[in-house]
Image: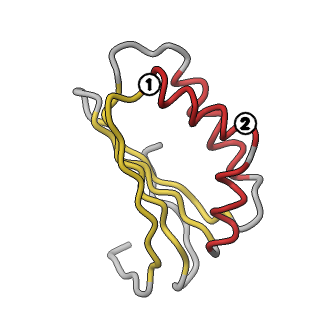
């Protein structure tokens, strides 16, 4: 993903996922695309922004209407499988943070 998410005026929530990938793809790219596709169909999903450098460090921020939407996404069956694979094979390390966005501004 290389574009800015089109978001409403705050407040909304951001789920910030920072990760260090393991070497090789091992199905990661396909699953990452599938997760975005699935998330886009979830109630309360607002958008996503993601970047990864050549050394495998990446940050993905997904935006959600409320905490209930985030909780529902966490429990989604396919997403749970992706989480399991992440623990087992795709990530050396990761951190997940959830934040409420109170204000936002930028240059368009």
Residue 20 in picture, x, y percent from top left: 31, 34
| Residue to which mark 2 is pinned | 78
Split into 4 quadrants, where in the image is the C terminus? bottom left
Mark 1 element type: helix
4 and 103: which is toward the camera:
103
Location of residue 72 by image quarter: bottom right
Q: Residue at x 66, y 62 (%)?
A: 71
Q: Position of residue 94 (x, y in %)?
A: 36, 42
Identify the coloring.
secondary structure
Q: How many marks?
A: 2
Position above or below: 94 against 88: below
- Contact between marks 2 and 1 (CB within 8 A): the answer is no
| C-alpha distance separating marks 2 and 1 | 16 Å
* Residue pictured at 22% horizontal, 27% vertical: 55
Residues 7 and 107: in front is: 7
Mark carried by residue 43: none
Q: Which residue is mark 1?
A: 90
Residue 14 shown left or right of residue 46 in the figure = left
Residue 89 left/right relative to 37: left
Q: Quadrant of residue 54?
A: top left
Q: Is residue 48 above or below residue 100?
A: above
- Crowding around mark 1 (Cα neighbors within 10 Å: few <14, some 14 to 19, many 20+) is many
Q: Earlier in the sequence, mark 2 or mark 1?
A: 2
Figure check: 74 above or below 37: below
Where residue 34 sits in the image (x, y, percent)?
Answer: 66, 34
Residue drawn at (57%, 36%) of the image: 83
Residue 69: x, y in percent? Answer: 69, 66
Q: Label 2: state its secondary structure.
A: helix
Mark 2 crowdedness (10 Å alpha carbons): few <14, some 14-19, many ≥20: some
């Amino acid at each position: 993903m290389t574009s800015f998410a089109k978001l409403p005026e705050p407040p909304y929530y951001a789920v910030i996922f920072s990760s260090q990938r393991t070497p090789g793809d091992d199905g990661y790219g396909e699953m990452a695309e599938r997760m975005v596709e699935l998330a886009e169909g979830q109630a309360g999903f607002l958008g996503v922004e993601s970047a990864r450098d050549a050394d495998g460090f990446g940050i993905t921020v997904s935006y959600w209407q409320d905490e209930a939407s985030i909780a529902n996404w966490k429990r989604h069956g396919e997403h749970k499988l992706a989480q399991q694979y992440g623990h087992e094979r795709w990530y050396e390390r990761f951190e997940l943070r959830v934040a409420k966005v109170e204000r936002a501004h930028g240059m368009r």
